[in-house]
Amino acid sequence: MNKLFFYKNFFKKHLTQCILLFILFIFLAIIFLNIPISKINTQLPEHVDAYLVSWIWSWEDHILLTDPLNFFNSNIFAPFENTLAYTEIMLGSFLLAWPILIIFNNPILAYSIVVLLTFAISGLGMYLLIYYLTKNKLAALLAALIYAFAPFKLIHSIGHLHLTGMWLPYVFLYLHKFFRIQTWKNILLLTLFVILVFLTGFHYFIFLPIIILVFFFTYYLSKSFRFNKDNIKKIILSLTILVLIFTPIILPFIQLKEEYNFVRSIETIEAYSPDLIDYLIPPVLYNYFYSSRSHMEMVVGPGLIIGLLFIFSLYYIFKKNQRIKSIQRNKTNFIIYFITASIAFIISFGFYIQFNSTNVGGIATFYSLFYYFIPGFDGIRAVGRYSIFVLLSITVFIGYGFTIYQQQCKNIFKKNIIYFLIIIFLFIELSLIPVVSYSEVKVYPNTEELFAWIRKQPPEKIFLNIPLGFRLNPEINLDIIHVFNSRLHFKRIVNGYSGQRPPNYDNLIYSLNISGPQKSLQLLEEFKVNYLIYYFDFYENPDEVRDWYINQLEQANNIKYVTNFGNNYVYEIVY
């Protein structure tokens, strides 16, 4: 009875702590990301992928309730099939967004809430991992703050929710637990978190087999893990579950790769890969170094404060009078995270390690082995994203280092001052990171009436929205606006935005923007377009542009006016 009472109190106490930490991380995410809480239901980050993810969730919410067998046949890039597989399917984050979509039917609100949840989930996961390894709450809290809000996370996660790495600490936690104690609970929870990593994004999932092998060989060689009949049963069950879940999701991606050769070229990977100096650049210099680049994929370094904490931790872990005790007790874990960080660090450079972007050539890495022989790596454009495994490993070493420091330092006042100063300096540096701004999602006049008309059209009809591509602004792809708005009718549209594009799509955009619809009829017929929809309010001088287009369209024999809703004009193509 007393034992039961103890466990109940223990569970309640730790559950309360976890809830409070979760709330703390959400509060900190609001601060670091400058999320406009008062307008959280009408504003999205000024990041094109925020609109893409919102549409993906809306599509999945729609199709799973109406026609789940056509899950991958999304309404964009018509008339092609399996078009959802042109990009990440985001099912892992969708599971978080789905209740919000059901209750509020607002993907804008869902996006901001899920952003906050991803930071809280990742922070709590790192806290649990470090506390499990060190049994030190202060060290676990510091590690959690570092992993949740490191520069890489604040720069990338606001638009790339599949890069938050929110489930990775849980995978590492249950890898440790399973290889130490092979219970059914540990293997099933490990399987669950591997599935969540897979559903959230393929980037990190394809790296997990490497991590699992590192754990296996390290624990096996240290004689901490043994094969026996029961363990083999557990592993087989886990693999069976994974295969059953992964297969129907992976197959459409494999089909598209074989049909259209959806792989990243070596030149593309190198263009998006960081250099050695990128690991050393502190956040205060991001605008200076990266303002001239079209992307922030080179942001991979941990920052100045986290880097100093890492050096401080290594000193305490390996200092002379502590070396034997600390290394022998945690030797297996140190090896695991050293190997993990080393592999991730090297492959994050792509095919060549260069000091900076002005270097020609470089030191060849073993990334070519990953690219040619491990499925999935030839589809990854920005390999610098694997620096998150370097970050995770650094965070673990920091957790260990500060645990040893606390054990050695007997002056409580000194320890508290050190922690206070670390948190202050860490927060100052993180506040200097140039995060993405939020802005109102623009609603164009009379589109509600237009979308109501579109919803009434037969399901086989295909629509093309104009203007498209980068027609009006070289920095804004208008297709993402059409994709985002298509959630209001889900009719098939030729417009699309994703990591890959179907054959001749770029030619169609170029032809329409340069030559107009009359001289692009062959391409329009290839895409089986039935209706052209012109949104003249997209232009700076809508009336002048409208009159010019109408004059051109009236001279086309195969294009007939159908209707208009304000400055939104619908034309039908007659083949």
Image (cartoon, rainbow, N blue to C red):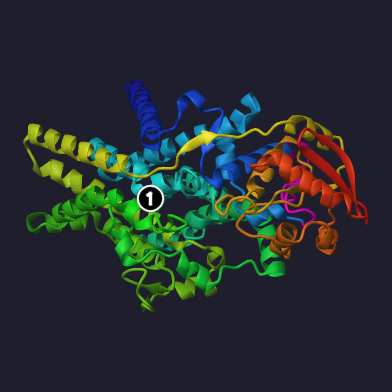
The spot of residue 314 in percent (x, y) is 18, 55
Choose between 345 and 536: the one closer to the eye. 536
Left or right, residue 506 beside residue 418: right
Residue 95 at what x, y percent from top left? 58, 38
| Residue 292, placed above or below residue 59 | below
Q: Position of residue 127 (x, y in %)?
A: 33, 39
- Identify residue for label 1: 152
Q: Quadrant of residue 345?
A: bottom left
Q: Can you say which quadrant of the picture contains the C terminus?
A: bottom right
Q: How many neighbours does mark 1 have within 10 angstroms: few (below 14), some (14-19), or many (20 or more)? A: many
Describe residue 220's horizontal placement relative to residue 445 as left or right.
left
**Who is closer to the viewer here, 134 or 570?**
570
Asked whether 401 or 244 is in front, the reply is 401
Q: Give the residue displayed 59% in from the left and 53% down from the top.
A: 242
Residue 144 appearing in the image: yes
Amino acid type, callout 1: Phe
Region in magenta: 63-80
Q: Residue at x 52, y 52 (%)?
A: 234
Please check the rendered image and state whether residue 79 is part of the magenta-colored stretch, yes or no.
yes
